[in-house]
Each structure stands twice: as C-alpha cells, then as structure tokens.
Amino acid sequence: MTYLCYLFIGQLIAANSHVYGSGLYGAEAGVHGQFVIQLNDVMNQTVTRGGAPITITVVNEECCYYLRVHDNNDGSYFVHYVLHKPGEYALNLKLNDEHHIAGSPFTLTIMPSKTVPENCTAVGDCLTSIVCNTTSTFTIHAKDIFHNHKVRGGDPFELGVMGPAQLKSLQDNSDGTCKNICLCCMFYFM
C-alpha cells in the first residue's frame, strides 16, 4: 500500500468515528469535563480493539494543553480535563496527529465556577464616605474560587448598610456585576 492509501484510510476512520459527552462543549472552571471517542473502521463498523494514536489538544491564544487519553482497549477512548481559566478554547481531536475526528475542532467554553463571596470585590467612593443628602453608587464584582470574574448575573447578593445611609436599590447587570445605589439619610444642622 502506498502512503496515499494509508492517508485515505486514516481520514475515513476519523470521519466515521463518533464523539459524545457534555465535555465536548465546555465546563465550569475547576470542574471535570469529559467525553468519549468511539472509533469506527472504513466500513463504518465499531472498532473493537484499542491502540489507535489519538491526540487531544485544548488551545487558545494564550496556551496549548495536551490531554491524556485513556484507551479502553475496545475501540473507545475516555478523555477528561479540568481547566481553571474561563474563556473559549479550540478542542482538537486527531487520529495519527493529522486527521480531525468527526466534528473536531470543537469550541470549548469554560465558564467561571460558583461565586465565592470572600473573593468578590466592591468598588466606589461611597464605600469610604458618603456626602449627606446625595445619592452615591458602588459596584460589586462577582468572582469565583479562582478569582475569575463572573460573566453572568443571577447571584443573590444581600447587602446591609450601617449608619445614616440607606440602600435604595440593587441592580443585577447580568454580566457578573451589581450596581448598588445608596441614598444618604438627611441631616439637618441647627
């Protein structure tokens, strides 16, 4: 057989194969993403033995990770990963390090994990002092356990104000921030 014949066989096996699992499309930061690859031969029949050279990479403009592939020795391959930095990555599944396996590359989206209150920050001048009879604002930036900024809203923040100020409203900006408006109590001097 010539090299072109082997090249065609590799392309056909990669095209006939199937991948499945929620981890193909993403996960939360710090949470396992996983998926399975099932190889099919040139006749589109399930391969029943292992040993295929499969390479998996997760790539973006800042990094490239090679993932470990677990060979189940039955024609299927299990892959799992844990990424801590949110963003979009290209998930490349290749046979013989040159043929993309069905659907590859996938767009892998890593979202920030659950909000951790002690990692959140608040920004605004009114946090240190408030001018009487004026409305002041500050913003809460939600962050996860890895200090990643949240990109979605919905966190149930509860706020308390001590002293002469009153909390007028709390607005979820649906982007990981909340804008808070404080209204200072009226003071009258005689």
Image: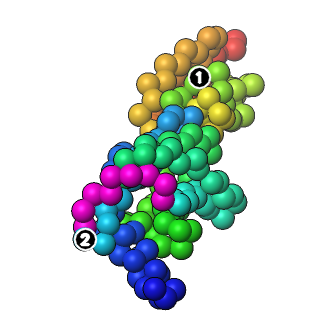
Q: Position of residue 2 (x, y in %)?
A: 49, 88
Q: Is residue 94 visible in this depiction of the protein? A: yes
Q: Tell me the residue at 46%/80% (across/down).
A: 6
Q: Tell me the residue at 74%/25% (across/down).
A: 129
> Horizontally, is 16 left or right of 149 in the view?
left
Q: Nearer the viewer, residue 131 or 44?
A: 44
- Mark 2 lies on a secondary structure that is loop
Q: Nearer the viewer, residue 181 or 23?
A: 23
The residue type indicated by label 2 comes to Met
Question: Mark 1 = which residue?
Answer: 117
Q: Nearer the viewer, residue 79 or 185?
A: 79
Q: Tell me the residue at 44%/62% (across/down).
A: 106
- Mark 1 lies on a secondary structure that is helix
Residue 40 lies in what quarter of the image?
bottom left
The residue type indicated by label 1 comes to Pro
> Horizontally, is 153 left or right of 57 in the view?
left
Name the chief secondary structure element in magenta. Answer: loop
Q: Position of residue 15 (x, y in %)?
A: 35, 71
Q: Please rate how many residues cluster around mark 1, counting C-alpha atoms within 10 Å: few if below 14, some from 14 to 19, many from 20.
A: some
> Horizontally, is 143 left or right of 18 in the view?
right
Q: Is residue 134 visible in this depiction of the protein? A: no
In the rendered image, the residue lying farthest to the right is 128
Q: Tell me the residue at 62%/29% (across/down).
A: 145
In this picture, which residue range is highlighted in magenta? 44-52
Q: CA distance from mark 1 to mark 2?
A: 55 Å
Kindly indicate whether the residue at mark 2 contacts the one at mark 1 (C-beta within 8 angstroms): no
Question: Is residue 68 one of those drawn in magenta?
Answer: no
Residue 8's disc is none
Q: Nearer the viewer, residue 99 or 165?
A: 99
| As drawn, 170 above or below 69 | above
- Please identify, in this view, whether the residue under mark 1 or under mark 2 is nearer the observer: 2
Residue 43's disc is 2
